Amino acid sequence: MAKAVNVLALVRDGHKYLFLYDDQSLDTVRAQLARFAEDPELDFTWRDAATLHDRLMDLQESHLNDKAEDFQAFF
């Protein structure tokens, strides 16, 4: 079975940040958001990191709800 790839993106002020990850890589994505926010050479702020983190959690919750609905529909 193929792994699903999730996409998290931010486009702001001509900058584009794109994160591709699978469901097992949430901690890695969170850590990368922090590394980007700490990097003074990037135009990526802690606010950007917080916004994307919130979106990441919303997507994860939605994904879990979809799985629960699929499971309930099966029975």
Image (tube, rainbow, N blue to C red):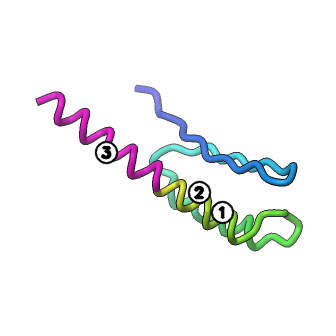
What residue is disc 1 on? Answer: 33
Q: Position of residue 7 (x, y in %)?
A: 59, 41
Rendering quarter of residue 5: top right
Q: Residue at x 25, y 33 (%)?
A: 70
**Label 1 to label 2, Cα distance in Å?**
6 Å
Instruction: Name the quarter where the N terminus is drawn.
Output: top left
What residue is disc 3 on? Answer: 65
Tag 1 near tag 2, CB within 8 Å: yes
Tag 3 near tag 2, CB within 8 Å: no
What residue is disc 2 on? Answer: 29
Give the structural element (helix, strand or loop) at label 3: helix
Q: Which residues are magenta?
A: 58-75
Of 47 and 75, the residue lying toward us: 47
Q: Residue at x 78, y 63 (%)?
A: 44
Sort mark 1 into few (<14), some (14-19) or many (20+) by Cα contacts within 10 Å. many
Rendering quarter of residue 49: bottom right
Instruction: Decide if residue 4 is on the left or right side of residue 12.
Output: left
Q: Position of residue 69 (x, y in %)?
A: 24, 37
Of 4 and 49, the residue lying toward us: 49
Q: Which of the two discs, 3 and 2, labels the residue nearer the N terminus?
A: 2
Give the structural element (helix, strand or loop) at label 1: helix
Q: Residue at x 84, y 63 (%)?
A: 43
Sort mark 2 into few (<14), some (14-19) or many (20+) by Cα contacts within 10 Å. some
**Label 3 to label 2, Cα distance in Å?**
21 Å
Instruction: Name the quarter where the C terminus is drawn.
Output: top left
Instruction: Decide if residue 43 is on the left or right side of residue 66.
Output: right
Q: Amino acid at mark 2?
A: Val
Q: Which of the two discs, 3 and 1, labels the residue nearer the N terminus?
A: 1
Q: Position of residue 12 (x, y in %)?
A: 79, 53
